[in-house]
Amino acid sequence: MRSIRTFLILTVIATLILFNFIAAIQGYRSSMAEAEQLFDQQMFNTAMLIANLPLEQNTTDFSHSGDIAFQIWKDGKIAASSSNAPVSAIAELTPGYGYINFSGYRWRALAYFDLRQNLWVTLAERSDIRYLLAENVILESVIPLLIGIPLVGLLIWLIVNQGLMPLTQLSKQLREKKAEDLTPLSEMELRPELVQITRSVNSLIERLRSTLEREKRFTADAAHEMRTPISALKVQLHNIAEEVPADSQSLIQLRAGVERMQHLVEQLLVLYRSTPEQLAENSRLLDLYTLAQDVMAEQYYLFESKNQSIELVGDHCTINGNDIALTTLLKNLLSNASKYTPESGQIKISVKKQQQRVRLTVEDSGPGVPEALRNRIFDRFYRGAHQSDRNILGCGLGLTIVQHILVLLGATITVSNSRFPTGSAFIIDFSEAKKADAS
Amino acid sequence: MPLLLTLVKQKRLMQVNRRVPQTYWMLLLLTVCEFSLARPPLIEIEIKDHLFYPAVVEIPANTKVKLLVKNLDPTAEEFESYELNREKVIVGNSISVIFIGPLPPGEYPFFGEFFPKTAQGKVIVKE
Amino acid sequence: MFLNSITLVLQEILEAALLISVLLALTQSFPKMKRWIILGIFLGVVGAYLFGAYIGSISEWFDYVGQEIVSASMQLSISVLVALIAFLLNPARARVYSTVMLSTICPVLVMLSITREGAEIFLYLQGNMTNSVYTRSVLAGSAIGTGIGISIGVVLFYLLTGLSSKSYWVVSTVVLALIGGNMAAQAILLLTQADWITYSAQLWDSSAVLTEQSLTGRLLYSLVGYEATPSIVQGVGYLSVALLILICGLTTKIKYIEKRRQRHAQ
């Protein structure tokens, strides 16, 4: 994962720094060389001046303690010198420049021979002071470059952010798009670079939308159409029941088959009738605990018939939702729990507030769901893997409906192990309804 | 390239004579012992006000020399020389030892890397 | 002082920046490794401060050559760890490392590299801050040196990650080999300076072509360990460590794997 933004900002700033600073160094070096030459030239002129000083006595001592020291040599001896010059020679008596240490400093030294006066002048200038003078002047031109870099960095950051804005907006649009939202992406502020992406995504969304629409309509229509023949079948079944003995195996099989088919059709209708719009319209504040209590009471016969114990614990928690959808959800979860829990098993429901979420947990003491299958159980028409599961009445749509409703409600579901020795726990997190939502 | 060639040759020799590695070890031992036997001449250099005293040091050719560098400044200095291939930090008010040589005759400048404008010096190697 | 601060700071920063950017590039697929490397940088800065603060007493160890010995052992450890990284991350070999192993090696490597280099910068700045006439030029120079060093690191990182997956590993290994060889050669030099390794003859003298004190020379010294007058032992050390790292990183059992694959296909 390499961010385009970081890449652009870092490489642009790095390149800028490299070129700018190297240019600064180059400028500094040539300016310093220039300054050095200038100072040397000045020293040469000073030496010429000193050579022309009138030498009245044999030795003259110029009282001087500044940054320049000199000696005047005549016939191999020091004829005159400044008081700050060393006793020994400042420089060898060969024309040219050099360096020497004395009086605790490093000096630039010059030996100059004056032909007219026939004397040598050795001159020394404090090298650190020369150097500082030159460097301070040159630094004045380098330092603005340095101070400018953070500013330029900030500007580059702003520019890159601005340049990537359309991309950021596009990805924000995509990120905030809900799974079931199949409206096309808005083409605001389209950049030529992004036109193709937006178009492709939109055409994909459109194809998906029409496919889903067709599938939904077909299933809903088919299910609806199948209700009438199933009702007719049930009437006929009732009639036949009076004609054949009650323990006829064929009759029992037939009744079970018809019931299963009716259940399937009902579930299919529930699945395709719950749409976001419908849910939003009938959404209101509900007490999840009371609702669970009601559904439990309604479904009690299921648990009674298998001699299962069921308990409900927790607090009264308010959530925002549609009561039909939530009832269906609870019904499906409870009947699932009952179906997959053996005779005299245990089922436990809890409703608890956790920070800003309301957690509904349905646990059973059934065989549990192996970890590998935990994602698959929500697939349409998926049913338990065991052969024994096949005998359980159901069509494999229960959990699909649960998940469908949860997506519409914006809740999440996770499957884990229950607190019983075996069995599964279905944990659903709703967002808690705030008081403001009541209005 | 000659180095690689000698390496190859040595490898061949080793295949011929299996006792060669022993000779190697002996040689290695000898070279390790050597430095404890020879006592190199000692030369003192002082650093004061970011200057070397003496700034010019004369040493004999082809002899290993032990430089005793005394930093009398309160600040650290780094004795550095590209020609001598030496680099050593000497903290303020302390003494350090640097071995140089054996060297062929010539001039080997050194400097204080922390204050190079003033701390300059050279080693002159004479026959 | 300006130019001097640049070269001094740049030289020290560049060696660490080089290592850090290669490590970052190589461990891209381990999302948490970035944090470990940053921890290594932090530890390195602390280590550099401590090393700088105690270098006076460290120098007195081993008969006044403690500084050389400690620095050389850090450099040799870097060489070894770099070889280990090349060996472990070699994509042609089966995964033999654990993330725990990598997240120990990386910060230690970074820490060692910064400790050694950083101590010098600390002492340098400390010495020059007391001398107020140079403060401005030293600060400006250090800032420019740091800027150039880090920028080269950034550019190298993006160059490496921009390469195709095959050449990316080859180039990274070559960079690792250069770092390892450089460290080994520097360690040998320090041990010679301490008189723990006896003097050996000069391998070549290229000071006429490129002196070490020039900016280019010092840059190359940091990048590939350029020496104008290396000794034979240094050359041998450099080559053998670099070769070792190349072997660790680039020898593959591809032929073997392909044969096995073919056998499976049949």
Image: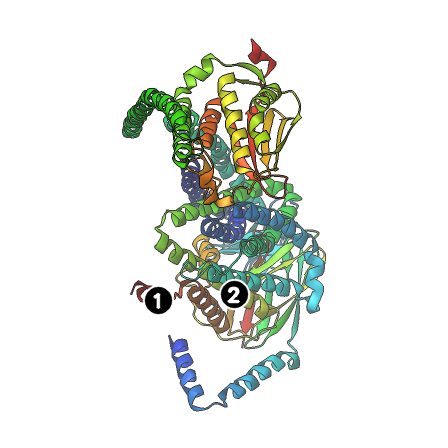
Can you identify the residue that label 2 sits on? C184
Occupied quadrant, residue A422: top right
**Marks 1 and 2, how far apart at CA:** 38 Å
| Quadrant assignment for the N terminus of chain B | bottom left
The quarter holding residue B69 reads bottom right
Q: Indicate the position of residue A107 as horizontal and vertical percent values.
A: 58, 52
- For the residue labelled by badge 1, is the local secondary structure a helix, a strand or a loop? helix
Name the residue carrying label 1: C260
In the rendered view, tell whether residue B81 sits above or below residue A375: below
Residue A247 marker: none
Out of A4 and A196, give the one closest to the viewer. Answer: A196
Q: Nearer the viewer, residue A203 or A304?
A: A304
Mark 2, chain letter?
C
Residue closest to the eye, A28 or C40: C40
Q: Residue at x 42, y 56 (%)?
A: C172
Question: Residue B48 in the image: x percent, y percent?
Answer: 67, 55
Q: Chain letter for mark 1, please.
A: C
Label 1 neighbourhood size at 10 Å, few (<14), some (14-19), many (20+)? few
Q: Mark 1 or mark 2: name the one nearer the start of the chain.
A: 2
Dividing the picture into quadrants, the one containing residue A208 is: top left
Residue C75 seen in the current view: yes
Residue B63 percent across, percent down from the top left: 58, 77
